[in-house]
Every structure is written in C-alpha cells, then in structure tokens.
Image (cartoon, grey):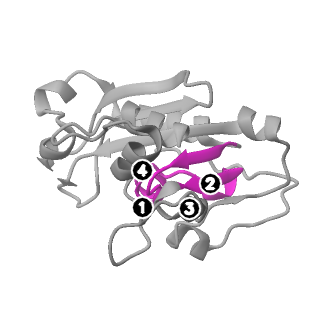
C-alpha cells in the first residue's frame, strides 16, 4: 500500500500521539462553519477478525460528505488468507467478498479521500491504523466515542468508562436503530456518525 505521505501546510496545531491514543477530537487551524462543512467527511469500515499475519482485512467501507453523498461505499476482497470474516458482527460472508474491489486499491483511495479533511466517525483508532491513514494529512478529527460535547447533550457513556456506544447514540439522539445483530453496516454507521 502506498501511504499518502503529504502533510498539511499552514496549520496551527500539530496533533500528538496522545490525541490519537485518547480518541481526542481536534481541528488543526481556525475554520469558518462553511469551511468545516466543505471539508467534513464521515467514515466507517468493517474488518475481518483476523488474517494470517494477525492484521485486520478490510471487507467494507463507506465514506460520505456532510450532504450524505456517497464518496465511497464498497465491499472489498482482502488479499491475505482470512481466519474469520467477522460475519457474526457485520453479516458479510466470504462469498460476498469474492470478486469485489481489491483491498489495497480501496485503501489507497481512502487515503486520498481523507487527505485535508475533517474525519468524523466512531472509535476511529482502528480505521486510522488499519487503513494507514496519514494523521499529519488530516485537517481534523471528531471521534464520537469520546466526544465531550455528548456529555453536554445529556448522553451517558458506557457504564464504568468514558466510551460512548454508537448504537446507543443513534437511538437516543436520532431515534434510529442501527447495528442489529449480525448486520453492522458501514454506510448506516457512517451516516449515523455524520447525523449525530
């Protein structure tokens, strides 16, 4: 995979490793509301639960803009031998993955789509790592799994922690049921994150 290595210029904030490890949200330079809306994309991805080299294989990904337009919505064919497709979580079976877009080709497209954008999603640490997204090339991140503004909206994190559950947020804020057992749909999750 060719990692998109360009860096943003003229930014006033350099995110730290802690920003990403603590699921912090940030914007790297002052932006107007219009600029934020123009640069905001929402993403969710689904992965295998293990490949031979112990990495995760991409099986499904969706990226949408603030208008809800699909920039990317595809199944993929992982390149490595898979121990488990993760079907019980997302409902995607091995036959469904056959003859889909090549995993590495899709990852390269994801890297291009994310460059210079504000990335919105839930628990984005996995996507950032598994998709080799250049963190220095992001304009910002809004990770709903630990967004402090959700406290202000009266939302409660998972018992005993500070981690918000996307399914619960979608139900409480949007009155929408997502992530029914065996069907965690990337497009549904990306849309819910954007709407929240």
Q: Which residue matches tag 3?
A: 147
Give the mark toward the camera: 3 or 4. Answer: 4
Image position, residue 72 (x, y; %): 48, 26
**Label 3 vs label 2: CA separation?**
10 Å
Picture residue at 74% right of the left edge, 32% below the top: 38
The answer to whether residue 158 is magenta is: no
Task: Return the disc, 3 or 4, that comes first in the chain's sequence.
Answer: 3
Q: Which residue is mark 1?
A: 164
Give the farthest residue toward the front. Answer: 154
Q: Label 3, secondary structure: give it.
A: loop
Q: Are marks 1 and 3 in contact (CB under 8 Å)?
A: yes
Say which residue appears at 35% left-offset and 51% top-offset.
168
Q: CA distance from mark 2 to mark 1?
A: 16 Å
Q: Which mark is residue 169?
A: 4
Circle 2 residue: 141
* Secondary structure beneath label 2: strand
Q: Which residues are magenta?
A: 117-143
Between the residue at mark 1 and the residue at mark 4, the CA separation in whole angstroms equals 7 Å
């Amino acid at each position: 995979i060719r990692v998109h290595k360009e860096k943003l210029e003229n930014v006033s904030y350099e995110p730290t490793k802690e920003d990403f490890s603590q699921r912090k949200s940030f914007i790297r330079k002052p932006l107007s509301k219009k600029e934020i809306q123009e640069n905001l994309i929402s993403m969710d991805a689904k992965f295998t639960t293990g490949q031979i080299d112990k990495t995760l294989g991409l099986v499904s990904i969706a990226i949408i803009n603030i208008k809800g337009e699909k920039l990317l919505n595809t199944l993929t064919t992982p390149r490595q031998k898979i121990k488990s497709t993760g079907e019980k979580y997302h409902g995607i079976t091995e036959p469904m993955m056959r003859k889909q877009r090549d995993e590495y080709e899709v990852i390269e497209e994801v890297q291009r789509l994310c460059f210079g954008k504000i990335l919105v999603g839930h628990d984005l640490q996995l996507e950032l790592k598994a998709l080799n997204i250049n963190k220095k090339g992001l304009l910002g991140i809004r990770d709903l799994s630990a967004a402090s503004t959700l406290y202000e909206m009266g939302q409660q994190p998972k018992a005993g922690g500070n981690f918000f559950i996307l399914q619960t947020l979608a139900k409480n804020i949007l009155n929408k049921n997502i992530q029914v057992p065996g069907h965690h749909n990337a497009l549904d999750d990306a849309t819910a994150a954007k709407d929240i």
